[in-house]
Image (cartoon, rainbow, N blue to C red):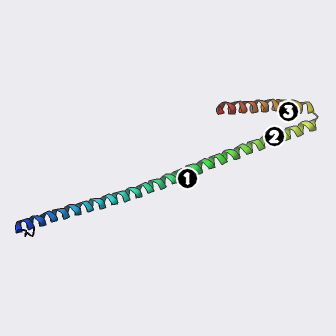
């Protein structure tokens, strides 16, 4: 099997090798483009995720601010009602109208009992 290759066969082998090298180079270029595409996709996804987190942070901050403002308003209202009630009771005691205070307390307790009962009814209804 010690045959020598003729020049045509050698030329064909060289051409086939050139073609294989060209195909291999194209494959490498394709893989490089795919890697670059993946890298850009990851960067874009990371940017989107950061923007999404920032938007979520702003939403939660706004929600906390609104909730805190609602609590402040509620506490101010409760404080003012308590002050008005104390002033009314003080004046009624000063004027000698203790029966008015007793009637007012009965009315307030009736409203409070209805409010607490309604709250508990609604709370139990939601949980079932």
Of helix, strand and loop, which one carries label 2? helix
Q: Which residue is mark 2?
A: 84
Taking the spot 49% from the left edge, 51% from the top edge, the residue there is 52
Classify 10 Å Cα crowding around label 1: few (below 14), some (14-19), many (20 and above). few
- Residue contact at pointers 2 and 3, CB within 8 angstroms: no
- When the figure is inspected, residue 80 is found, relative to residue 51, above or below; the finding is above
Q: Residue at x 74, y 45 (%)?
A: 76
User: Residue 107 at x, y = what percent?
Assistant: 82, 29
Task: Choose between 81 and 111: the one closer to the eye.
Answer: 111
Residue hosting label 1: 57
Please state the horizontal and vertical placement of residue 106, each as a whole percent of the image.
Answer: 85, 30
Q: Callout 3: few (<14), some (14-19), or many (20+) C-alpha neighbours within 10 Å?
A: few
- Above or below, 85 against 11 in this view is above
Quadrant housing the N terminus? bottom left
Residue 99: assigned label: none
- For image coordinates 55% across by 49% down, the residue present is 59
Q: Position of residue 54 (x, y in %)?
A: 52, 54
Seen in the picture, residue 45 relative to 121 is either above or below; the reply is: below
Q: Quadrant of the C terminus?
A: top right
């Amino acid at each position: 099997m010690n045959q020598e290759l003729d020049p045509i066969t050698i030329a064909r082998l060289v051409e086939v090798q050139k073609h294989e090298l060209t195909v291999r180079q194209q494959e490498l270029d394709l893989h490089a483009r795919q890697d670059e595409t993946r890298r850009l996709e990851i960067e874009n996804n990371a940017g989107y995720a950061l923007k999404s987190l920032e938007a979520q942070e702003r939403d939660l901050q706004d929600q906390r601010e609104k909730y805190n403002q609602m609590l402040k308003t509620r506490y101010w209202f409760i404080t003012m009602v308590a002050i008005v009630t104390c002033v009314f009771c003080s004046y009624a005691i000063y004027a000698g109208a203790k029966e008015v205070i007793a009637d007012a307390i009965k009315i307030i307790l009736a409203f409070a009992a209805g409010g607490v009962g309604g709250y508990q009814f609604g709370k139990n209804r939601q949980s079932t």
